[in-house]
Structure formats: C-alpha cells, structure tokens
Image (cartoon, helix red, strand yellow):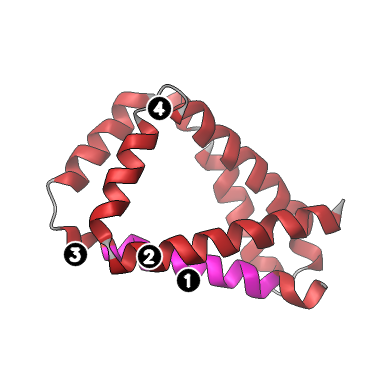
Amino acid sequence: MTTAALIVVGIFGAILLVTGVAWVIRPDHLLGTVTRVWRSPAGLPAAVGIRLFLGVALLLSASASALPGLFTVLGWLSLAGALLVLLGRSWVDRILDWLSARNTSFLRIPALLAALIGGALVYGVIPAF
C-alpha cells in the first residue's frame, strides 16, 4: 500500500511541478484554468475527491518518504481542504473574483509555491525507490 501511495504522490508532485513552472511563465493561464475547472459542474466534487485521495496518499507514504514531516502536514492540509464542500461554491467564487481583480503577475506567487511543493513531493519519494 505504501508503494502505491508513493507512486501517487510522486506523479502528483511531478504534475504540480510542471504546471507550477508553466504557470510562473504564463500566470494568466493559472486563473483562467482554475476558474474554468472550478465553475464546471464537476469542479467542486473533483476538488474534494482529489484532496481526499491525495491527503490519504500523503499520510500513507509519509513514513517511507525522505520528508515525513512535510508529507504529514501536507496530507492533513489536503484532507482539511476537502472541507471546501462545506463552504460551498459561492465562497470560492468570491476568492476567484478577488484574484481576477489582481495583476496577473501576483499569480506567480502561488504558482511558484505549487512548483516548489511539487518538487519537494518528487524529492520526497525518490529515495524510497
């Protein structure tokens, strides 16, 4: 089970790293993509499902990773993020509207953070293999 969880975390980390770097280069695509996905009918259930799946994978793989503390913290944060379903769509819509009013260069900050977290996830699973 731990190996499967490490693979899931490694794949997610690689995707997060690549998309984070792409969004640092083209920050206008970050908000457009997030808004489009979030406002689709499957947006909320997908966001919750991904957070639950990733949170469990992070917690299961934490002890076998090179960064167990980070994996544990991110796992619990991911599970807590699944509570978005309780906040509802309107709450996230307000955040997206607020972000839309900002300069697109501002979006490079969360994109860089995503790339760094993705890189840390990949780094964390490599020694386990």
Residue at image point 64% right, 70% down: 122
- Give left or right: position of 108 versus 117: left
Residue 108: % across, % down: 28, 65
- Give left or right: position of 48 versus 3: left
Q: Is residue 120 above or below residue 52?
A: below
Tag 3 near tag 2, CB within 8 Å: no
Q: Which residue is label 2 attached to?
A: 22
Q: CA distance from mark 2 to mark 1?
A: 13 Å
76 in magenta: no
Q: Which mark is residue 116?
A: 1
Res. 90 image quadrant: top left
Tag 2 near tag 1, CB within 8 Å: no
Badge 1: residue crowd in 10 Å (few <14, some 14–19, many ≥20)? some
Residue at image point 12% right, 46% down: 101
Q: CA distance from mark 3 to mark 2?
A: 13 Å
Comparing labels 2 and 1, the label whose residue is closer to the camera: 2
Q: Which residue is label 4 attached to?
A: 87
The main secondary structure of the magenta stretch is: helix
Q: In this orientation, which residue lies closer to the viewer: 21 or 51?
A: 21
